[in-house]
Amino acid sequence: MDLAREHGISTQAVRNYEHAGVIPAAHRTPSGYRRYSARHAIALRAYLALIPAHGYATSGEIMRAVNTGDLDTALRAIDRSHAQLLRDRETLDAVESAVGILANPPATDRPDRPLTVGALAHRLGVTPATLRKWERAGILEPVRDRATHHRLYDPDDVRDADLAHLLRRGGYLLEQIATVMRRVRDADGPEALAGSLEGWRARLAARGRAMLLAAARLADYLHVEDDERRGAAATTTEPAHTTD
């Protein structure tokens, strides 16, 4: 099948896409064989371009919405994906800021013993409720005193809190800061963390470029679908021809 061969996929994959509603239903011959047209080829190109840009789930949502004439739902899905990419870029910026802070930490005294939630809140000039909120967001991971079950923040926790406070004052969201802290904890140090950022930025750039291609391919398909619907409307509204 030419439709499958163009993209290096199996004919069964094309049938699966049809069954899933991401490409239009094929026309059938009297003997039951599927017949795919240029419309199906353009739809398949659009779907396959959408996947690296928006992922399988969102791409399927977009195509099914387009195929049922629900353009608003399709565009909303695209908007959400673009918004997520922007948040990812902002998170990367936050991580890069954190690397700079970790490489050149501010000259603040580190405590020589664990701090209670009240003591750490006083140090930062925030409320204990704020620190508990940061903990729920995954930014801080204090241990509990075995006897009192009170939160205790060791020097590394204090470092994380200082960093989170700086990023929060910089306007970063808790979700973004939590991602920063996970990467800080997972890395062996600021140098290793800095080394991972180049690949992260390259992946975001690749996704952005994929979105550009996907937009062009989807626009082609929308144009075809508009023509298809106009043709169908014209056919159904033609006056019946009668003879006397």
Image: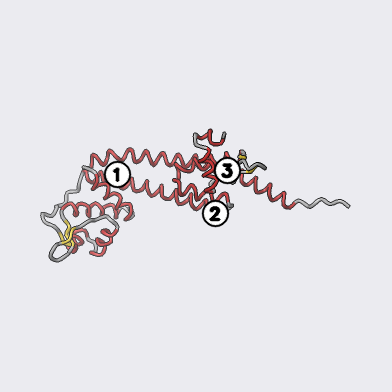
Horizontal relation, residue 131 to residue 29: left or right: left
Residue at disc 3, secondary structure? helix
Residue at disc 2, secondary structure? helix
> Compared to 13, does 241 lie above or below?
below
Q: Quadrant of residue 198?
A: top left
Q: Looking at the picture, which amino acid does disc 3 mark? A: Tyr
Q: Earlier in the sequence, mark 1 or mark 2?
A: 2
Name the spot of residue 205 as percent of width and height, x first: 40, 40
Q: CA distance from mark 1 to mark 2?
A: 36 Å
Q: Which residue is mark 2?
A: 72
Q: CA distance from mark 2 to mark 3?
A: 15 Å
Q: CA distance from mark 3 to mark 1?
A: 39 Å
- Which quadrant, please, contains the N terminus? top right
Q: Which residue is mark 1?
A: 96
Horizontal relation, residue 173 to residue 213: left or right: left
Q: Residue furthest front?
A: 31
Q: Residues within 10 Å of mark 1 (few under 14, many from 20)?
A: some
Q: Quadrant of residue 190?
A: top left
Name the spot of residue 194 as percent of width and height, x first: 27, 40
Q: Is residue 193 visible?
A: yes
Residue found at x 78% / y 52%: 239
Q: Earlier in the sequence, mark 3 or mark 1?
A: 1
Residue at disc 1, secondary structure? helix
Residue found at x 47% / y 49%: 58
Q: Residue furthest right?
A: 244
> Compared to 113, does 40 lie above or below?
above
Residue found at x 24% / y 40%: 192
Q: Looking at the picture, which amino acid does disc 1 mark? A: Glu
Q: Which residue is mark 3?
A: 221
